[in-house]
Image (cartoon, helix red, strand yellow):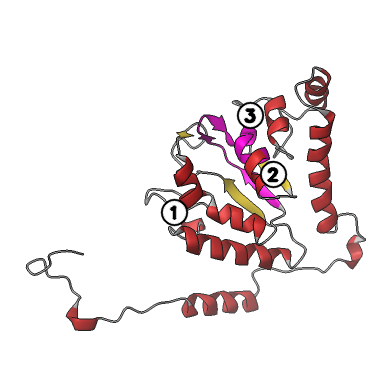
Amino acid sequence: PGINIIRSPLGGRNFEYFSEDPYHNKVIAVAQVKGVQSQRIAACVKHFVCNNQDTNRFRVNAIVSERALQEIYLPAFEAAVREANAWSIMACYNKVNGFHGCENKDLLRKRLMKEWGFHGFVVSDWFATKNPTNTEGCLDAGLTLEMPIPIKYRRRRIKRAIKEGFVSEETFNDNVKRLLRVMFLVGMFDDGSKLPQGCRNTPEHQALAREIAEEGIVLLKNEHHLLPLDITTLKTI
């Protein structure tokens, strides 16, 4: 699920996200991750982090204070990890305080993995590693899987990064273990013929989606003739 906070009304993908309120955002994120993973399907929580606009999202540098990170941008991601045990995280295109999402060691290795106890894997946004990043930076930061094709994670580049001492074998092995762990969790090494077969967009699904939408409607009671607003009598809102 996309759980970026709806920070700007101009955000081109706001329709995908849950809320402009950090608390509601994290509550919904936790519920969705738990629901998805209850079916042995890995939830991929994105876009980590501060990807709150689509204009120039490949290169923009989000300069964010520590307080804003802790109070606004990180709560939903932290809750998805600590409370829902999300199995995967997608790193963003943009920079955060000078470092691209895929090689931002402070956000990935330090906060996500060490502070929050994330045991899943980190995947790049599509072609997020293409131009600005380097192999050793991504490996060291904790990027596990490069998508949709290996550009920086080609075998010769990885071998060279380890051989020249830019990345330790321990770090590389940790990245591999993270991916393998989730592959086992979702049953990729099980007998495929015994896995439950799913279906999508059935009449039953459509009816349930309609019911959920209808029950989520909140009616506003017009007490004391508040509406319509009268500019001649209105002083403050």
Q: Dot 1 corresponds to which residue?
A: 6
Q: Amino acid at mark 2?
A: Lys
**Residue 116 visible in the shown view:** yes
Indicate the position of residue 40 as horizontal and vertical percent values. 77, 63
All told, the count of numbered labels is 3
- Sequence-earlier tag: 1 or 3: 1
User: Secondary structure beneath disc 3?
Assistant: loop
Mark 2 and mark 3: span between their CA atoms?
27 Å
**Residue 125 visible in the shown view:** no
97 falls in the magenta region: yes
Mark 1 and mark 3: span between their CA atoms?
27 Å
Q: Residue at x 44, y 59 (%)?
A: 21
The label number, if any, that marks residue 130 in the structure image: 3
| In this picture, residue 237 sits left or right of residue 187 | left
167 falls in the magenta region: no
Q: What is the magenta range?
A: 88-109
Q: Where is the N terminus found, in terms of image quarters?
A: bottom right
User: CB atoms at circles 2 and 3 under 8 Å apart?
Assistant: no
**Foreground of the two, 74 or 37:** 74
User: What crowding class fits label 1: few (fewer than 14 Cα within 10 Å), some (14-19), or many (20 or more)?
Assistant: many
Q: Dot 2 corresponds to which residue?
A: 114
Q: Residue at x 48, y 41 (%)?
A: 66
**Foreground of the two, 236 or 101:** 236
- The part of the image, by quadrant, that contains residue 139 is top right
